[in-house]
Amino acid sequence: MRHRAGSAAGDTPALQLPLHWGDDGLVAGVDEAGRGPLAGPVVAAAVMLDEQRPIAGVADSKTLCPARRERLYDAIMARALCVGVGVAEVEEIDRLNILQATLLAMQRAVAALRLRPSLVRVDGNRLPVLPMRAEAVVRGDATDAAIAAASIVAKVTRDRLMDALHACYPAYGFDRHRGYGTAQHLRALQMYGPTPAHRRSFAPVAHALTHAALAQPTVPLGQR
């Protein structure tokens, strides 16, 4: 049984860490980051927590500020039994579609675990094909500590990848919107056209490609 730990007023409730053994072995939590953006990869993480090394404050990554996510990421990487990360690149997203690319990233994350779980619990209502028992957990990032930890690892990993893209294409603001379709991002798409990091199968990017074919970008890609 899982419980929420008490918190100070205004703080996000933290998840107490349960014993993460199933009936017949270790349990891993899996979550992803980056299904909705117009640019960048989708990243999944798989985390197997260690009950002997609890991590205070683990919660759904969307409820945490960036600084707290970074601190928890470091703690998870130091104290979890093992962590696996899987990435599906933009080319795979465009070729397979975003759902299948997300499931592929999840498969890669589980395969990257140093230990083999007997049960994998995945946030959401869809499951990747895995060589072990798996179950989908709707809103699992808010109710399951291992899934919440996976959401933090996936989010921080993807944010760092988007920071690297920002260094290549600073005019697009990837360090702020992380590839999501904000007004700033859509304006940059219309002004400069898509970069190689943009998902061409997503409608706003396809629309920008049509316009880019009719006019030269105002700033060369390599100088943005």
Image (cartoon, helix red, strand yellow):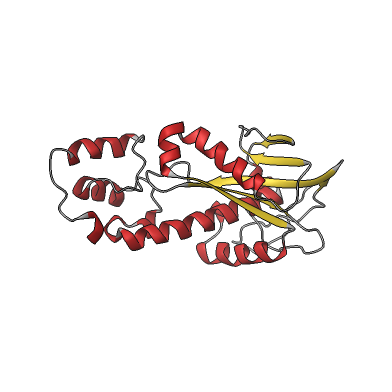
Describe residue 212's horizontal placement relative to residue 116 as left or right: left
> Closest to the observer: 22 or 61?
22
User: Is 165 displayed left or right of 73 in the figure?
Assistant: left
Displayed quadrant of residue 14: bottom right
Q: Residue at x 29, y 52 (%)?
A: 184
Instruction: Residue at the far left: name it.
Output: 215
Q: Quadrant of the C terminus?
A: bottom left
Residue 156 can be seen, yes or no: yes
Report x, y in % for residue 9: 63, 63
Position above or below: 67 against 138: below
Q: Is residue 60 visible?
A: no
Could you tell me how many numbered marks the image carries? 0
Residue 202: percent from left, percent from top: 36, 36
29 displayed left or right of 89: right
The picture places residue 70, in percent across and down from the top left corner, at: 56, 65
Query: Which of the 4 image quarters holds residue 164?
Result: bottom left
Residue lying at the far right of the rendered structure: 23
Q: Which residue is drawn at 36% across and 48% down?
A: 197
The x and y percentages for residue 85 are 59, 51
Q: Which residue is depicted at the point 26% across and 58% down?
A: 171
- The residue nearer to you, when weighing 52 against 42, is 42
